[in-house]
């Protein structure tokens, strides 16, 4: 798959993008699958070029629910250094989130489209909601086949469309979740760009939190991957099918 030029380079806008506020996370441990995305000549950049690494990156996400109006995500590297944070947008509906870098700068806003039958979420640069700052959207794959159940697994599939994909005839990325093994895989075509695994421990159960481990593969925007996992979590929490 060839990515639109506007998503492969920050061009003259790099200086306007907020810094991450910390050093690049270290390489992931473990072995990547054979079809993991690695192409250096065609990196996948959606949120920012500064979130590209030439190696797999491991991140941890903790989602803590305090009240209906306050639930946050803390994203760290494997050594618990802060990388990102997701917060509710103050004085707004609870279906809007803002992804911040480690220094507290807003990177993107995640907004659920009201009355969308596909549970569509739209993502904009910074705290904007202007069409010129629209980056991508995420929705459930269909109305009829939202989940495919067998005796051993339950699968939820989401489609991701970049802003340039106005026809939406084919998604730019797909997210496939296996609920029983609490994992998800994010694809660009047949290549795996990231994987997530849900993790639980005694502490997370006591404080009403979900923990996720994420691996973003080389030359993939790991801020984009984090945004996708947060949206997946929100869709699952608000599922009514």
Image (cartoon, rainbow, N blue to C red):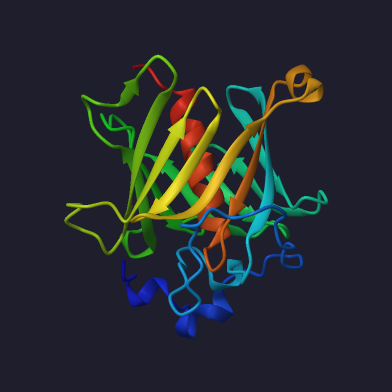
Give me the residue at 25% from left, 29% from top: 117
Q: Tag count in the figure?
A: 0
Residue 140 is left or right of residue 209, and the answer is left
Q: Position of residue 105 (x, y in %)?
A: 64, 60
Residue 81 is left or right of residue 10, and the answer is right
Decide: is 162 above or below 232: below
Nearer to us in this view, 202 or 92: 202
Decide: is 149 above or below 4: above
Decide: is 127 above or below 185: below
Give me the residue at 56% from left, 28% from top: 182
Instruction: Give the quarter of the figure containing the C terminus.
Output: top left
| In the image, farthest residue toward the bottom | 12
Q: Position of residue 110 (x, y in %)?
A: 46, 46
Residue 73 is left or right of residue 121, and the answer is right
Q: Position of residue 139 (x, y in %)?
A: 33, 39
Nearer to us in this view, 212 or 135: 212
Is there any visible trace of residue 44 in the rendered image? yes
Give me the residue at 50% from left, 58% from top: 36
| In the image, farthest residue toward the top | 151
Is there any visible trace of residue 94 in the rendered image? no
Instruction: Give the quarter of the figure containing the N terminus.
Output: bottom left
When asked about the image quadrant of residue 148, the answer is: top left
Q: Position of residue 168 (x, y in %)?
A: 20, 52
């Amino acid at each position: 798959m060839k990515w639109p030029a506007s998503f492969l380079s920050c061009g003259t806008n790099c200086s306007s993008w907020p810094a991450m506020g910390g050093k690049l996370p270290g390489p992931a441990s473990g072995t990547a699958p054979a079809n993991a995305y690695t192409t250096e000549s065609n990196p996948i950049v959606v949120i920012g070029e500064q979130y590209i690494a030439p190696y797999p990156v491991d991140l941890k996400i903790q989602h803590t629910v305090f009240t209906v109006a306050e639930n946050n995500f803390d994203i760290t590297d494997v050594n618990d250094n802060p990388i990102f944070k997701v917060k509710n947008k103050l004085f707004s509906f609870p279906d809007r989130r803002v992804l911040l870098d480690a220094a507290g700068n807003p990177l993107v806003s995640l907004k659920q489209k009201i009355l969308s039958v596909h549970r569509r979420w739209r993502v904009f640069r910074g705290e904007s909601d202007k069409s010129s700052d629209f980056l991508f959207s995420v929705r459930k794959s269909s109305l009829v086949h939202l989940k495919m159940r067998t005796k051993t697994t339950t699968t939820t599939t989401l489609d991701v469309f970049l802003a340039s994909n106005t026809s939406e005839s084919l998604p730019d990325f797909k997210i496939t979740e296996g609920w029983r093994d609490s994992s998800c895989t994010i694809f660009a075509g047949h290549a795996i760009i990231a994987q997530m695994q849900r993790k639980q421990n005694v502490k997370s159960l006591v404080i009403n939190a979900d923990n996720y481990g994420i691996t973003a593969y080389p030359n993939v925007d790991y801020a984009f991957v984090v945004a996708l996992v947060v949206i997946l979590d929100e869709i699952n929490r608000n599922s009514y099918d």
